Image: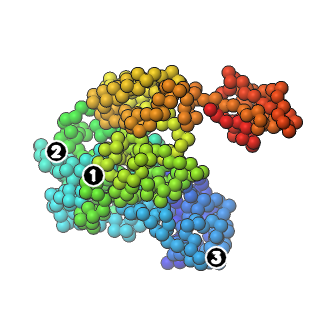
Amino acid sequence: MYRSHVLVCGGTGCTSSGSQKIQEKLKDEIAKAGLTEEVAVVQTGCHGLCALGPIMIVYPDATFYAMVKEEDVPEIVNEHLLKGRVVERLVYHETKGGDAIKSLNETAFYKKQHRIALRNCGVINPENIDEYIGTRGYEALGKVLTEMTQDEVIQCILDSGLRGRGGAGFPTGRKWQLAKNLVQDGGQKYVCCNADEGDPGAFMDRSVLEGDPHAVLEAMAIAGYAIGASQGYLYVRAEYPIAVERLNIAIKQAREYGLLGNNIFGTDFCFDIELRLGAGAFVCGEETALMTSIEGNRGEPRPRPPFPAVKGLFERPTILNNVETYANIAQIILNGPEWFASMGTEKSKGTKVFALGGKIKNTGLVEIPMGTTLREIIEDIGGGIPNGKKFKAAQTGGPSGGCIPAEHLDIPIDYDNLISIGSMMGSGGLIVMDEDNCMVDIAKFFLEFTVDESCGKCTPCRIGTKRLYEMLDKITKGQGTLEDLDKMEELCYYIKDNALCGLGQTAPNPVLSTLRYFRDEYVAHVVDKKCPAGVCKSLLSFVIDREKCIGCGACARQCPASAIIKTDYIGPGKKLPAMEIIKDKCLKCGACMEKCKFGAISKK
């Protein structure tokens, strides 16, 4: 029996910051101190507060250590684990409460969250099935197989109001019902999981797979029972090596425990799961393209109808849900549909996980009840905008979403509200932007991504997004016209109405939303030939204020293009001649402005 457990984050973010070396050092130091029999080191998934990684939590006192380095480990072991004295300099400041350590749930980042999909992330060792079982894992599967009919399981999901967390928000129970009721020839049906998370800045599904893989496997088995399928496929991108490794371990363990395979829980139900690795094509997040890829073909979307519930993987009835959707299933079965439906809004029940990134203090993973306002997410949970900057916009839904301006900060976040203001839920990326972001450049960034990721199968997406990007590029170079704005808007609606799949249909959203809310920035680029945010290089120039310049030459030494020279001008009280930037040679990199300590250089 251990007296202390030390939880170390083993998610991708903390791993990239050295958490694996911290774990190894921790075990070595514990052994040196003779504490091996008293202190257990537990590798967990993501705790959510990625801005403070690597993270270490010591139980039973729940001391939260932030930004831990390998060289900090000996002090933590000798002071805290051996002598019982907390290492104050490493403690997350919000958990300090006098002589006692405050609960994490009392901190601003966590107290407005409600973790269902993320309930085990940062809590259990994802590579140990016993720890998952210890949190009521696989109890829901046992319940449905021994106590519930297929229709009762589906009705439970319908009553909960759970909608797909992959973007479109289709009712999960209805999708299962369609596949279950389809009786063809008694042949195979399939259950698929979409873990092909491709939105820039999104890492929700990855974190669930890394921190709680059995939750997804259990839910897929429940779905298999509900629709009458015996085979599942989990499609995950190969760029998620930690998630892939832990999924392989979890599947192996579940098979060994008889929780996957034949006659699960002593019943007639048989179900197994295989992994399929994707090569990182964004289009494979679309359900028919994903299924085409699983079949071994190039990932391209197929026309619908027929829908996958009728004719999906290998032309058989198939359901596909994303990772976060599955992560809610077992908890709905165990706690009842009324429990889940009591959270959220009328048409958007439960919680939603967001990957919070961009110009925000507390970057990380958050799970909030539907209906929480954008202001609460950004100011309370996210800690606000750093460096005293003003909030400008938030991009939800990645390349498929839109930019939400400050005027909608108090809108409750749910599926319908986001669509009404020109954005969408998407899978859950939430990128925050401040006054230094150019909204034309943001739209151009997402269009460039979409153009690169288009599979090329349909003309509106293949050619339409390319023409749209070219117009945006023209505007950011100061070559656009007011007529281009009208042409862009017309092209956006054409692409939305005629593209084959969701990738193309939603590709214009970043352009339409920025045109809707930030048209003045487009006009400034076109009419005034200026970028108000000072981002677009073609419309930017750096100048040196002769009166402020002391002629030290630091800017010239920093300039990679040798574009800064001395002038003949020596200002009042100055000893050296002022510097000047040769505009034709300037690369507009901004290195000179960063180097100047006297505020003599500005961009216009």
Residue under the image location 55 percent in, 37 percent down: 533
Q: Quadrant of the C terminus?
A: top right
Q: Which mark is residue 187?
A: 2
Q: CA distance from mark 3 to mark 2?
A: 64 Å
Within-10-Å neighbours for mark 2: few <14, some 14–19, many 20+: few
Q: Which mark is residue 329?
A: none
Q: Which mark is residue 85?
A: 3
Check the image and name the residue furthest to the front.
572
Out of 399 and 457, give the one closest to the viewer.
399
Q: Identify residue for label 1.
A: 163
Q: Which element type, helix, strand or loop, lies under badge 2? A: loop
Q: Is residue 68 left or right of residue 296?
A: right
Q: Is residue 538 left or right of residue 348?
A: right
Out of 200 and 331, give the one closest to the viewer.
200
Q: Is residue 144 left or right of residue 11?
A: left
Residue under the image location 41 percent in, 39 percent down: 517
Q: How many callouts does the rendering have? A: 3
Please, what is the three-letter code of the amino acid marked with disc 2? Gly
Please, what is the three-letter code of the amino acid marked with disc 1? Arg
Tell me where residue 537 sits by quadrant. Answer: top right
